[in-house]
Image (cartoon, rainbow, N blue to C red):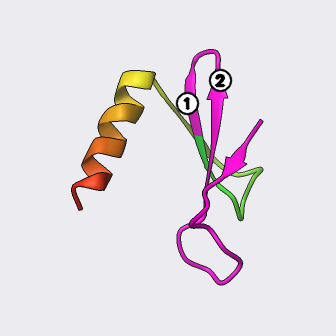
Amino acid sequence: MWRKSRRSNDHGGACVELAALPQGVGVRDSQDPDGPKLLLAPVAFRALLAELKQR
Protein backbone atom coordinates (compact mmCIF):
# COMPACT_ATOMS: atom_id res chain seq x y z
CA MET A 1 0.00 0.00 0.00
CA TRP A 2 1.36 3.41 -0.98
CA ARG A 3 1.39 6.15 1.65
CA LYS A 4 1.65 9.85 0.87
CA SER A 5 4.04 12.05 2.80
CA ARG A 6 2.37 14.34 5.32
CA ARG A 7 4.28 17.21 3.70
CA SER A 8 2.69 16.58 0.31
CA ASN A 9 -0.21 18.78 -0.66
CA ASP A 10 -2.31 19.74 -3.68
CA HIS A 11 -0.47 23.02 -4.24
CA GLY A 12 2.48 21.64 -6.21
CA GLY A 13 5.87 21.07 -4.71
CA ALA A 14 7.38 17.81 -3.52
CA CYS A 15 4.78 15.05 -3.56
CA VAL A 16 6.15 11.68 -2.53
CA GLU A 17 4.57 8.32 -1.74
CA LEU A 18 6.30 5.36 -0.12
CA ALA A 19 5.46 1.67 0.02
CA ALA A 20 6.96 -1.08 2.16
CA LEU A 21 7.55 -3.90 -0.31
CA PRO A 22 9.07 -7.35 0.18
CA GLN A 23 12.09 -6.30 -1.90
CA GLY A 24 12.64 -2.92 -0.18
CA VAL A 25 11.06 0.54 -0.12
CA GLY A 26 9.16 1.87 -3.13
CA VAL A 27 9.22 5.61 -3.88
CA ARG A 28 7.03 7.38 -6.43
CA ASP A 29 5.59 10.79 -7.36
CA SER A 30 2.10 10.99 -5.87
CA GLN A 31 0.94 13.17 -8.76
CA ASP A 32 1.99 10.49 -11.28
CA PRO A 33 1.16 7.13 -9.65
CA ASP A 34 1.47 5.27 -12.97
CA GLY A 35 4.84 6.87 -13.73
CA PRO A 36 8.33 5.72 -12.80
CA LYS A 37 9.07 4.28 -9.38
CA LEU A 38 12.25 3.72 -7.41
CA LEU A 39 12.94 0.58 -5.42
CA LEU A 40 15.51 1.09 -2.68
CA ALA A 41 17.06 -1.51 -0.44
CA PRO A 42 16.23 -0.76 3.22
CA VAL A 43 19.83 0.25 3.97
CA ALA A 44 19.85 2.63 0.97
CA PHE A 45 16.54 4.15 2.05
CA ARG A 46 17.87 4.77 5.58
CA ALA A 47 20.97 6.42 4.09
CA LEU A 48 18.76 8.63 1.88
CA LEU A 49 16.68 9.70 4.88
CA ALA A 50 19.79 10.47 6.92
CA GLU A 51 21.15 12.62 4.07
CA LEU A 52 17.86 14.49 3.64
CA LYS A 53 17.60 15.21 7.36
CA GLN A 54 21.02 16.89 7.28
CA ARG A 55 19.84 19.45 4.71
User: Residue shown at 53%/69% (left/top)?
Assistant: 14
Query: What amino acid type should be assigned to the residue bearing mark 1?
Result: Val
Q: Is residue 6 left or right of residue 46?
A: right
Q: Is 13 left or right of 35, judged from the image as shown?
A: left
Please give the label number shown on residue 25. 1
Q: Tell whether position 2 is magenta.
A: yes
Q: Which residue is mark 2?
A: 21
Q: Is residue 42 left or right of residue 34?
A: left
Q: Residue 31: x percent and y percent?
A: 71, 65
What amino acid does circle 2 point to? Leu
Question: Is disc 1 placed on a helix, strand or loop?
Answer: strand
Q: CA distance from mark 2 to mark 1?
A: 6 Å
Rendered image quadrant of residue 25 = top right
Residue at image coords 61%, 61% = 6
- Whether 14 is drawn above or below 37: the answer is below
In this rendering, the answer to whether 41 lies above or below 5 is: above
Task: Report if the CB atoms under discs 2 and 1 are less than 8 Å apart.
Answer: yes
Q: Is label 2 in a helix, a strand or a loop?
A: strand
Disc 2 residue crowd, few under 14, some 14–19, many 20+, Cα 10 Å: some
Write the start and end of the magenta stretch as one range: 1-26
Q: Position of residue 55 (x, y in %)?
A: 23, 62
